[in-house]
Amino acid sequence: MRAIAYDRHGRAGQVLRLSEQPAPAGPAAGQVRVRVLSRPVHPGDLAGVEGFPGVPRQRFATPRIPGLEGMGVIETVGDGVRELRAGQRVAFFPVPGAWSELVTVPADLVVPVPEGVGDETAALMLVNPLTLLSLLRAVEDAQHGQAGPVVQTAAGSSVGKLVGAAALRHGIPLVNLVRSATGAQALRQRFPGLPTISTADADWRTQVKDATGGRGAQVVLDAVGGSLTGELAGLLADGGTLIAYGGLGLGSTPLESLALTPRALTVRGTSVLQWTASCTPGERAEDVAFAARLAATAPELFEVAAGYDLADFAQAVDHARRPGKSGTVLLTSPAS
Ligand SMILES: NC(=O)c1ccc[n+]([C@@H]2O[C@H](COP(=O)([O-])OP(=O)(O)OC[C@H]3O[C@@H](n4cnc5c(N)ncnc54)[C@H](OP(=O)(O)O)[C@@H]3O)[C@@H](O)[C@H]2O)c1
């Protein structure tokens, strides 16, 4: 089978290679074998290939096949698996090695694709909605029952748009931050009901202050980090919470510079990688049902930027990193 692999960490365009690999063993009891048709190129996948610069302790062992999420068709069902059958379309997460043509997956990590949900939407059906749920829970925890203004960075990202839609649905007073005037214009068109501010404006901090009623934000949801972290802590009202969930930006910010103690600020992280460990099987089933419902009822929230065959991974990676891209890039492979 074909797979994208890498032997050492580095820029994805330089270290990834198309390889021929033996098909995975199995399926053993309780597993299914899935022929993968489509999988996303998430920013986190690329950060993993790069070896999580700045946090080398998080590095994966190499050689390795990236990817944790995807969709495909079940080829073979292992002993004891009753609720799934060969030929069924399924999504899966978290399954290491999703950037290959075949994966063997524990049956409890496989989710049947609802009728009417297309393959492209199904390939994105789990990670981003589950991330949305973890962010909404973190915001709720930070609010202690008293909802105040929430600011989010990288608001034009796929996750950011899910947050925007959820804010409108739940009445969360959200302020969107993006890094360019064109990004701000596009997001204002999509969410006319939400203030959107570009950090390219010289007075963006004042604009945020005004948009948060002069008090500052109760919560900042941040996917950028790096040297922006200090600015973001400055947007918080005293007692506020910065929730970090991505590292798109460059640079770093010393913890001591954030005035955590005098201003009683909280900084915390959240990761969908903790989801399997932190939820009970019942909670996981509810979260997955939410994701499947969202895919079925709001496919426009699962925008695809473009699809590339596995062999064209270099173009896919390049597109995934392109400034101004809207939606998620998919890597595809044929059904047989
Ligand atoms: N913690 C978790 O469990 C988890 C799970 C899923 C995703 N994430 C994180 O969520 C974030 C968004 O993921 P996604 O898949 O939704 O992304 P995406 O659709 O690929 O969009 C990326 C967005 O980030 C913006 N961006 C890129 N570099 C930036 C920078 N240096 N400063 C400001 N904005 C920047 C881009 O803005 P332009 O339009 O201007 O190019 C674009 O809107 C990523 O950080 C990802 O790692 C975290």
Image (tube, rainbow, N blue to C red):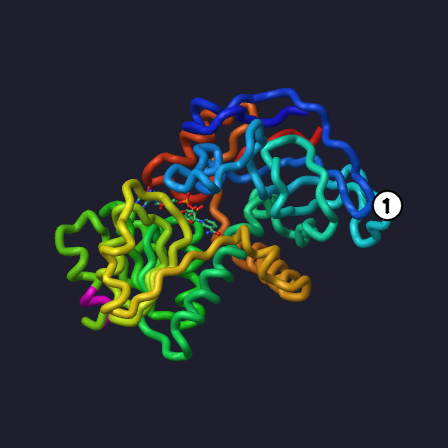
Q: Quadrant of the C terminus?
A: top right
Whether residue 210 is in magenta: the answer is yes
In percent of the image, x 61 and y 39: which residue is there?
Answer: 96
Which residue is rendered at x = 72% and y = 28% of the image?
A: 23
Name the residue carrying label 1.
Answer: 79
Question: Does residue 67 sit above or below 91 in this rendering?
Answer: above
Identify the residue at image location x=49%, y=25%: 8
Quadrant placement of the N terminus: top right
Q: Main secondary structure of the magenta part?
A: helix
- Furthest residue in direction right, as rendered: 79
Q: Is residue 175 above or below residue 8?
A: below
Q: Is residue 310 magenta-colored?
A: no
Which portion, as a residue range, is magenta?
Answer: 209-213
Coordinates of residue 290 in the picture (x, y in percent): 59, 62
Foreground: 333 or 259? 259
Residue 128 shown left or right of residue 264 in the figure: right
Q: Disc 1 marks which amino acid?
A: Asp
Q: Position of residue 283 (x, y in %)?
A: 63, 65
Q: Position of residue 27 (x, y in %)?
A: 79, 39
In the image, 188 versus 212, the foreground residue is 212
Q: Is residue 296 visible?
A: no
Mark 1 close to ligand 1, CB under 8 Å: no
Residue 109 visible at all: yes
Give coordinates of residue 190: x percent, y percent: 36, 55
Please tell me whether mark 1 sits on a helix, a strand or a loop: loop
* Mark 1 crowdedness (10 Å alpha carbons): few <14, some 14-19, many ≥20: few
Q: In the displayed structure, does residue 143 sit left or right of residue 113?
A: left
For residue 187, above or below residue 209 = above
Q: How many marks?
A: 1
Residue found at the very far left of the displayed protein: 202
Residue drawn at x 77%, y 41% is 87
